[in-house]
Structures are given as structure tokens and as C-alpha cells.
Image (cartoon, rainbow, N blue to C red):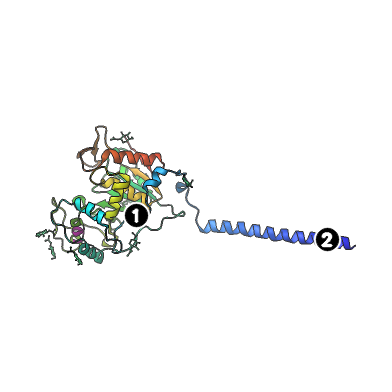
Amino acid sequence: MTMLLKRLRYIIALLSSMTILLVLYFQNSATLSFYSFVRKPKSHICLEDRGNSSWFSERYKPTVPLLLNSTNSELHANIFSWWKELQDVPNVTNYTEVVNQLFSLFPDEEHYSDAGPDRCRTCAVVGNSGNLLGSNYGQLIDSHDFVIRINKGPTEDYEKDVGNKTTHRILYPESAVDLNDNTHLVLLPIKVLDMQWLISAFTTKNITQTYTEVPSTIKASKDKVMILHPEFMRYVHDNWAEGHGRYPSTGFLALIFTLHICDKVNVFGFGANSNRNWHHYFDETLTSFESSSHGGDFENQTIYQLHQENKISMYKGLT
Ligand SMILES: *[C@@H]1O[C@H](CO)[C@@H](O)[C@H](O)[C@H]1NC(C)=O
Ligand SMILES: *[C@@H]1O[C@H](CO)[C@@H](O)[C@H](O)[C@H]1NC(C)=O
Ligand SMILES: *[C@@H]1O[C@H](CO)[C@@H](O)[C@H](O)[C@H]1NC(C)=O
Ligand SMILES: *[C@@H]1O[C@H](CO)[C@@H](O)[C@H](O)[C@H]1NC(C)=O
Ligand SMILES: *[C@@H]1O[C@H](CO)[C@@H](O)[C@H](O)[C@H]1NC(C)=O
Ligand SMILES: *[C@@H]1O[C@H](CO)[C@@H](O)[C@H](O)[C@H]1NC(C)=O
Ligand SMILES: *[C@@H]1O[C@H](CO)[C@@H](O)[C@H](O)[C@H]1NC(C)=O
């Protein structure tokens, strides 16, 4: 009898510990599925296997400052002297004073520090290559969260091939065009004067000349203005262009910038034509691939390597 009782007690103990285990198990899986629900599973477009590339990680520096603000504006001496060399205007104004003025006018904040495993931001970076003509990429380009365009590249009259959405436009005074209210003006400053022009364009409108005539003003939202960091330009020059050319092309800078603020990068309208000339979809200008101040060949190789490594996807249009 006592034997039987003992065995019964043993079985009950066993059963209850099993129950506890089961409860724990189900609780856990419930918590898990609850979390995966709350954390919003990453969309499949960002889940693709991006591989493990030492080539990429040797170059990609996630901590580089992308955009200038009042707290990160002080430049290391070697960066300042490199950047200063790019300027083909004789008098370099006091950089510190200009920066102070910039951030009394334009947003002074940290942008795009939200990278993380849960973010799935899709981006189209749209170059100005003639390979866009007849491509029918318009709808596809507009379906991205961010659409980053470069210099004067228009959308009007080319919507079918290039789309009509522009969240960011990277430009400098000599390539400036008017923007929609919902587009970020991203200044590529190649000289202090470019920053002064930006200030002037929204205030006194009295800078009308750099090395060439520039618009005295520009239609754009003041509270959406951003300025690429000179240290970022130097980083792209050193790490990605490996010192080729005097400084990186706007398109190449735009592409690496996009790589830093987005999780899925699709690249449109990059590439020279068969005669190794850069040509635009919107005009007849031809620029030789080699003879510019940019390392065209090397930039091209790097972009193809990024594609090979699955970090970007190239859409080549009709080439
Ligand atoms: C990628 O490779 C490096 C070095 O080979 C290794 O330390 C790292 O754990 C790998 N990461 C992944 C996600 O496989
Ligand atoms: C450059 O220096 C000259 C002479 O000091 C001055 O007249 C001119 O306004 C300066 N330009 C800019 C853009 O500051
Ligand atoms: C530049 O301006 C800052 C702030 O006004 C001042 O402290 C600094 O001495 C100036 N530097 C030069 C070289 O004039
Ligand atoms: C400026 O940007 C840096 C990152 O480059 C960030 O750490 C800092 O908080 C930003 N400062 C302001 C005022 O937003
Ligand atoms: C872009 O095109 C779409 C559809 O073709 C249209 O609905 C939208 O209003 C256009 N947006 C702009 C900013 O032109
Ligand atoms: C533009 O106007 C400002 C303020 O009146 C003045 O300080 C500056 O020197 C002017 N710049 C040019 C290039 O005329
Ligand atoms: C760019 O690089 C790719 C891949 O190496 C090559 O096929 C293409 O011809 C290059 N373009 C130019 C204009 O050299």
C-alpha cells in the first residue's frame, strides 16, 4: 500500500514538473511569436543573403559621419587640407564661421542613425545615364522608399523611364535646379563657397558667380536641407575610389551615401555608353570617361564589385 502511494506521489510529481515544462515551453513560444509580431518581420526584400564579404567590410565604415551638423563639423587637419585643395577659388573664407551660419539656418540634427536588423528601407539611386531611355523603369523606381537623384537629372517628360518621385537630390551650386517641397536638397560641398552659396540662396541671394554663373536662389524646403560631410567625401575617395581621380564623382558619392542610409540599394542610370563617354538621358552632353577629375574606370569597377558582392543591384536599362 505504502509502495503504491509512493509510486503515485512520484508519478504526480513527474506529471506536474512536465506540466511546468510544457507551460514554460508554450509560454516561450507564445512570447516568441508575440515578439516577432511586434518587431514586424523584415520584409523579404531585405532578407536576401548578402553574403559575407571581407572585400566589403574592409571598405565599409559604418561610423563615418555622413552629413554635417554643428557638433561634427570640426575637421581633422588632414581632411581639411585635402578638402581645401579641391577648391578652385583663391580666397578660402573662415570655414568655422560659415558652418555656424549654416546651422543657424538649416536643420542641425543627426539624420539616419536608425540602422539595425529590423529596418528595411529600399532605395533607388538614379544616375543620369542615357541607358535609362526606353527602359520603362519609372514605376519600379517610384516604388522605393527613397529615390535619390543627381544634379540636373529631370523627371518631367521622362516619367515613364525615370519615375517622378524624388526624396533626395544631390547637387552643388553649378548643377542646381528647383526642387519639390518634399525633396531633400543634399548639398555636395566641394568648396566653402558652395556652403556660402547655399546660405545666400535662402537669404541675401547675392552670390551669383562661382567659377561660372550660378543661380542666385533655388526653390526648395529650407527645413529639408542636408550637407554632405567633407569627411564622408574623403572616406569615399580613400576607401571606395582608393585614391583614383581628384575626388569622387557625384554619382559615386550618391551611391555610397545610399549604401549607408538604406538596406536595399537598387542602382539605375549608371554607366557610360559604348564609346566610353558619360552621356545624359536628357541632353546631348558627352563627357569622356577617363579625362574628368574622377576615377571613372575605377569607380565603374567598384560599382560592379558591389553588384557581384550582392550589396547593390544594377539595373542596366537598354545598353
Ligand atoms: C564573416 O567572416 C568573418 C571572418 O571570416 C567571421 O568572423 C564572421 O563571423 C562571418 N560572419 C558571418 C555572418 O558569417
Ligand atoms: C574674396 O576676396 C575678395 C577680396 O578680399 C572679396 O572682395 C570677395 O568678396 C571674396 N569672395 C568671397 C566669396 O568671399
Ligand atoms: C574663424 O572664425 C572663428 C569664429 O568666429 C574664430 O574663432 C577663428 O579665430 C577664425 N579663424 C581664422 C583663421 O580667422
Ligand atoms: C551630428 O552628427 C553626429 C554623427 O555624425 C551625431 O553623433 C551628433 O549627435 C549630431 N549632432 C546633432 C546636434 O544632431
Ligand atoms: C507621379 O505619378 C503618379 C502616377 O503616375 C501620380 O499619381 C503622381 O501624382 C505623380 N506625382 C508627382 C509628384 O508628379
Ligand atoms: C552678400 O551680402 C552679405 C550681407 O549683406 C555681405 O556680407 C556679403 O559680403 C555679400 N557677398 C557678396 C559676394 O556680395
Ligand atoms: C565597367 O565595368 C564593367 C565590368 O567590369 C565592364 O563590363 C564595363 O565595360 C565597364 N564600363 C566601362 C565604360 O568601362
Residue 116 in the image: x percent, y percent? 44, 55
User: Which quadrant of the frame does ligand 3 lie within?
Assistant: bottom left
Residue 113 in the image: x percent, y percent? 38, 58
Image quadrant of residue 271?
A: top left
**Are there few (<14), some (14-19), or many (20+) residues within 10 Å of tag 1?**
few
- Can residue 164 be seen at all in this image of the molecule? no
Which residue lies most toward the right here? 1
- Hey, what amino acid is under mark 1? Val
Q: Secondary structure at mark 2?
A: helix
Q: Which residues are magenta?
A: 195-199
Find out whether residue 96 is within the magenta segment.
no
Main SS, magenta residues: helix
Residue depicted at 50% across the width and 56% down the height: 40
Give the residue number, with chain letter if any, for mark 1: 64
The mark lying in front, picked from 2 and 1, is 1
Residue depicted at 38% across the width and 40% down the height: 307
Q: Nearer the viewer, residue 304 or 158?
A: 304
- Hey, what amino acid is under mark 2? Leu
Give the residue number, with chain letter if any, for mark 2: 8
Residue 208 in the image: x percent, y percent? 13, 56
Q: CA distance from mark 2 to mark 1?
A: 68 Å
Q: Is residue 139 above or below residue 23?
A: above
- Answer whether labels 2 and 1 touch (C-beta < 8 Å): no
